[in-house]
Amino acid sequence: MRSLAISLVVMLALGLALISSGCMQNGPAPDTSAPEDGSSVERGNYTSNETLVAFVESAAAYVRENGKEKALAEFSDLNGSFIQGELYIYAYDFNGTTLAHPVNPEKIGVNRLNETEGDVGIFLRKMNDAVRYGDGFGRIAYINPMRDRVLESKLAYGVQIDETWWLGSGVYTGSVDPDTSG
């Protein structure tokens, strides 16, 4: 019985050592805090998940306060209040049609479920599922319209507004990793 207990303790210690070995970090942790002065997020800074979520939640609150039509117009305005550096709000219906997109206004009214630019179609299907009953995160390989249309990886967060549409935003995280896109 005693040898069994010792074996369990040793196995537990080895398991914890293996699990935590991937959690070690060399060097200082990146700054992921939100700007304290309310300034926009610029390329080269990190945006935390909390900042991204707060940005999207503020857009959802704007919809509730101002209605769908006014909100979609504001979200589609490149000079509007929902542009903060590379963060911007976009909106889609659950059929994959773009309802708002300030940096690609030519996509408004276009169904993008079968689009092959980056992995938009795959992303929209995944986000539709993620936000169908609330909110969720997704990752997309997307052409960064604010950086010479370079294909980059983007972490996105979205919320369902009602049973017909959702809105979201995302932060570009750098070059595309083929193992994580799509």
Image (cartoon, rainbow, N blue to C red):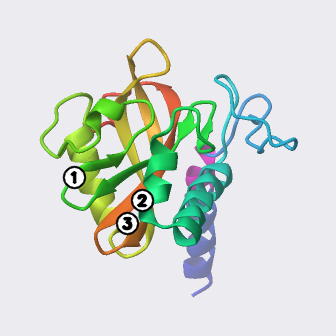
Three-letter code, disc 2: Glu
Residue labelled with disc 3:
131
Q: Does the magenta stretch include residue 20?
A: yes
Mark 2 Cα-neighbour bin, 10 Å: few <14, some 14–19, many ≥20? few
Q: Nearer the viewer, residue 7 or 143?
A: 143
Nearer the camera: disc 1 or disc 2: 2
Which quarter of the figure has residue 154?
A: top left
Nearer the camera: disc 1 or disc 3: 1
Identify the secondary structure beneath mark 1. Answer: loop
Per the rendered image, the range of residues in magenta is: 17-22
Residue 169 relative to residue 39: left or right: left
x and y, in percent, of residue 39 in the image: 79, 36
Q: In which quarter of the image is the N terminus?
A: bottom right
Three-letter code, disc 3: Val
**Numbered circle sitting on residue 96:** 1
x and y, in percent, of residue 146 in the image: 49, 21
Q: Is residue 179 magenta?
A: no
Identify the secondary structure beneath mark 3. Answer: helix
Alpha carbon distance from label 1 to label 2: 18 Å
Closer to the N terminus: mark 3 or mark 2?
2
Q: Are marks 1 and 2 in contact (CB under 8 Å)?
A: no
Alpha carbon distance from label 3 to label 2: 21 Å
